[in-house]
Image (cartoon, coloured by chain):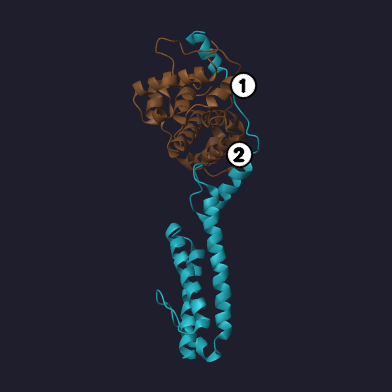
Amino acid sequence: MSPAPTGANDTDDVRAAAAGDRQAFQRLYRLHVGRVHGAVYRLAGYDHARAEDLTQDAFIRAWQKLPGFRHESAFGTWLYRLAVNVALMDIRARGADPVSMLDDEHLPDTGVTPFCAAERDELEHAISQLPPRARAVLVLHDIEGWLHEEIGNELGMAVGTSKAQLHRARGLLRKVLGEKS
Amino acid sequence: MNEFEWRRQMRDLRQPLTPRRDLWISIDAALDDAERTHEPVIQTASEHPSKHRQHWLLAAGLAASVLLIGSIGWRLLPASVTPRIANISKAPASWKPADPRLAGAAIELDAARMELQLAIQQAPHSPALQRLLNRTELQQAQLRQLANQAG
């Protein structure tokens, strides 16, 4: 689930930022913004403006919560998790209902393998068309590599629901991509 | 395509992305504001920023109208009345003078007071809003004195 390590030793900057050193926090921002923004951008349905707002919120929250950071995980992992949470809260705040927004009639039968090949741009565009929470499950599981247990905890759903959502999301994706496989 | 190929294709999408604009400038400014006001700076993206802006514009507009009306009332006030007015701390909740020249000002001031009270409910720790409310109430008291003097 956690993102790949950056390879940079940011411990000193994390401690300094937690003590109120804004310049140290700026260095942390420069180091981690790409990874954080990438994840938020995908969860926000490839919407640049919204993703930028959410990334900004995530760093502001990080600054406020930094004094409580216990160094039990890498700072990058903690920050990434916090940013994902900000993006998911935004999805929840928008009242996204995954079930009602999906059209079961257009989903493939359970026997059909819901995988298909596509160009990167096509794939991203298709993901952006998914209903927000179905997209969140797909992005977290298939792209970010989260486990269903983690997704269930974060989105407040059972593991089975997460699996069902993933299957639905893949099916919708296949439909959007025109069943190219 | 099987699941393994699918996963590889999807994992390829997991790329870092630099924002189109430098977000640090906004983040730094937001943290500065928070330090100045000691108020929370988080505003979720789901909230519409213009809504907050509208509230503040409304409050600012009302404040400007209150000041204008107040200054007109102050000029109309005889000098001998001024010291007595300074002792009046609260104006009644709603009051309309019989003099039509003063009635409009009374309505405006009353509306301004109610709007400011609503704004204070949303930002109870704002000293600026509290000052405006005090000033508005004082101006209502001054208007009342003026109406009494006029008979």
Mark toward the viewer: 1 or 2: 1
Of all residues, the one furthest to the right in this rendering is B21
* Residue at the image position 46 percent from the left and 18 percent from the top: A171
Where residue B65 appears, x then y in whole percent? Answer: 56, 70
User: Which amino acid lies under the numbered mark 1 shown in the image of this protein?
Assistant: Asp
Visible residue check, residue B143: yes
Question: Tags 1 and 2 in contact by the CB under 8 Å rule?
Answer: no
Q: Earlier in the sequence, mark 1 or mark 2?
A: 2
Which chain's residue wears label 1?
A: A
Where residue A162 appears, x then y in whole percent? Answer: 39, 23
Q: Is residue B118 above or below residue A113?
A: below
User: Which amino acid lies under the numbered mark 2 shown in the image of this protein?
Assistant: Gln
What element does badge 1 sit on?
A: helix
Which is more toward the observer, B95 or A160? B95
Distance in Å between CA atoms under marks 1 and 2: 32 Å
What element does badge 2 sit on?
A: helix
Tag of residue B39: none
Where residue A104 appears, x then y in whole percent? Answer: 41, 22
Which chain's residue wears label 2?
A: A
**Does residue A68 appear left or right of residue A123 in this picture?**
left
Label total for image: 2
* Residue at the image position 56 percent from the left and 59 percent from the top: B57
Q: Residues within 10 Å of mark 1 (few under 14, many from 20)?
A: few
- State the hue of chain B: cyan
Tag of residue A121: 1
Which is more toward the observer, A173 or B67? A173
- State the hue of chain A: brown
Tag of residue A26: 2
**Does residue A133 appear left or right of residue A42 in this picture?**
left
Q: Is residue A179 above or below residue A61?
A: above
Where residue A48 appears, x then y in whole percent? Answer: 60, 34
Of all residues, the one furthest to the front in this rendering is A105
